[in-house]
Image: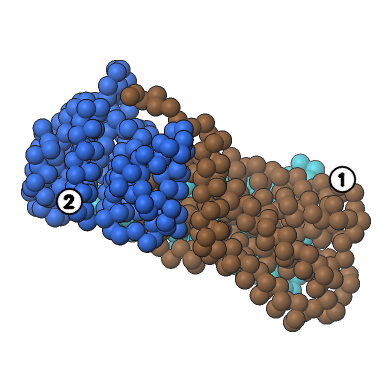
Amino acid sequence: MNMEIKKSPLHHEIYVVFIKDVKSELRTKVAANAILLFALTTLFLVSYVIGPYRIAPADQPYILSAWLWIIFFFSAMSGLSRVFVKEEETNTSIALQLAARPEAVFLGKFLFNLVLMLGIALIITPLYVILMEFPIGSVYNFCLIIFLGLVGMTTGVTIIGAIVAKASMKGTLFPILSFPIIIPLLLAVIEGTSMTSRSVSFGQTMQATSVIIAFTGAMFVLSLLLFDKVWLE
Amino acid sequence: MKIVIFFWLLMVCYLSFLYSPPAAGFIGESSRIVFFHVPIAWVTVLSFLVAMIQAIRFLKTKDPIYDLKSAVACRQGFLFAILATVTGSVFARVMWQSFWNWDPRETSITILLFIYAAYLILRASIEDPQRRAVLSSVYATFSLVPALFLIFIVPRIYFSLHPDTLINVQGKIQMYGRILFTFLFSLGGFTALYFWMYTLECRIEQMIYRKEGHYE
Amino acid sequence: MSLTLQAENLCHRFGKISLFSDLSFALGKGDVLVIAGPNGSGKSTLIRILSGFLNPTMGKVSITEDGKTFGPRHCFHVIGMCTPEMRLYEELTGWENLDFFARLRGIKDAPDRLKQALSFAGLEQARHRRVKVYSSGMKQRLKLLLAFFHAPPILYLDEPSSNLDEDGIKLVSEIIQSQHEQGITVIATNDSSEYEYGNKKISLAP
């Protein structure tokens, strides 16, 4: 037996971590329920109190985009840290630290968070568009911006979830730490979403999109570099 | 050293109120705020960079002294961020009759304020010194990305009510003569003040650490 | 081709309390180190330091092979560990727990091999039930299995016989016996009947 013990290839480890989290989640459904419930409650509240008719048509793109992303952001805050917090609270993280590479843990859990958010978006977005009568000019751009924005959001907050898992007051700490990090992304993504309510070509949303992509890329690389320090602490 | 700084800043006050003329395009005497607001905002950013560099050094060397210094820089940066926000808000009130407008630059300084506050809250919520040091250093380093975006990219892209920055779109410096002199004088003064405060608090914290074996 | 685990001048303080100081030893294949001492004497802390989960106040732990030296944090994949703090995934079954860790470790998960391993630990009957419903003895056996099944060069056992009945204790004995032939074992215990497993011993005073 030597140090070159045969290890799994990275992509396989990532997949295994991801599948385990999916299995766990399907059995307990805690995170998904939390996020979905939060999103639906906020959605119905906004729809009931504000509704599509209280906003002047000129303001609709901006206000409706902002509300949608507020819903997404706070939904994320109610569920995306669970993937790490649960490991810490149930003391399963020790065995995982021994068995899996930190990169694999991060990427597997990142994928899980991403799938969770995209799943929620698939439910919430059409409901939102219908209830609030969001005028979408270009469906393709709309979906693209939402997708990119969610990828960016998940990238930014996953490592924050890992940090928060190792501290106390995890529930309240997660939004406090995440908000300043995510703000530039939210600004760009709300701008981009509001633009898609007119029929714009992809090139015109380029400015917002490039900010989103640049931000996501930088966050992703930095997360990968820093994650093992957080995870193994 | 502190005598020099004291008199330097006294000079700054004299220069900014009596020596330099009010600038055109501003209401009344309000342009004088630039001699205070901009250096303070600059120090806020400088402090953030210092905090971040010390955090990275800590992550590389695991020497708790760097984490101590990073925390000092964040506490002071927080103070300066509050001052910058307040002075900016006062100016906004005079100039545009409203205390707050969510102008991109105002937003940037606020978010920087939030980053500082979040860092300090994170530190307060972890008991174990080693863990606290690692996690807060990671957070400080991580917040570099949004900070860079906010400080440099956002104001360029989005329309801003903010008076043109010193290095404006045409790349020319638009201050001249006495105003420029006063401004640079003030910039130097505040930077010196910051470094003096920073080294002083670092020394105090290090003494406490050596004596008691722990630090905040 | 075998590993050595070295501890040099290990000291650890908890606030003002010194747990141990100037601990030095080297372990090679076939060595079984027993760390003895009453509760609170620092046995678990020493295990955490040796395995890389805690930095000692002073001193160094290193793992050497073929002339190359590594810190313990770089060697997680050669370690197997079973401590009281560690827990299993309770919403998964015994089988799924084992399968998860087997796949992570690159072990080809032929269902027969997994079944064999689980029956070695006496868990064949319960393998498709969720760990949540296991008794504490069954959980302990599963933890021991997970620490050992990937044949780690270094095995850390902290109070391995806790919660175990006669059969469980026999399992511990078999594991240690097997590990003794293929690698290094470190056992922390306050059960004097386990002291006989070791060929080296450290006693920590309270």
Residue nearest the viewer, comparing C187 with B87 = C187
Q: How far apart are marks 1 and 2 (CA)?
A: 73 Å
**Residue at point 87%, 61% (across, down):** A136
Taking the image as shown, residue C132 lies to the left or right of residue C61, namely: right
**Residue at point 87%, 45% (across, down):** A203
Tell me the amino acid under the disc marked 2.
Answer: Glu
In the rendered structure, are the residues bearing label 1 and label 2 in contact, judged by CB atoms less than 8 Å apart?
Answer: no
Q: In which quarter of the image is residue B115?
A: bottom right
Tell me the amino acid under the disc marked 1.
Answer: Gly
| Residue A157 percent coordinates (x, y) | 57, 54
Q: Which chain's colour is blue?
A: C
Q: Which chain's colour is cyan?
A: B
Q: How crowded is mark 1: few (under 14 residues within 10 Å), some or many (20 or more)?
A: few
Label 2 SS: helix
Which is closer to the viewer, label 1 or label 2? 2
Label 1 SS: helix
Residue nearest the viewer, comparing A197 with B176 = A197
What number of labels is visible? 2
The colour mode here is by chain
Residue nearest the viewer, comparing B83 with A199 = A199
| Residue A79 percent coordinates (x, y) | 56, 62
- Farthest front residue in view: C125
Return the residue at label 2.
Answer: C166
Height in image: B82 above or below A142? below
Disc sitting over residue A203 in the figure: 1
**Residue at point 17%, 51% (across, down):** C166
Query: Pointer 1 indicates a residue of which chain?
Result: A
Taking the image as shown, residue B137 lies to the left or right of residue B155, namely: left
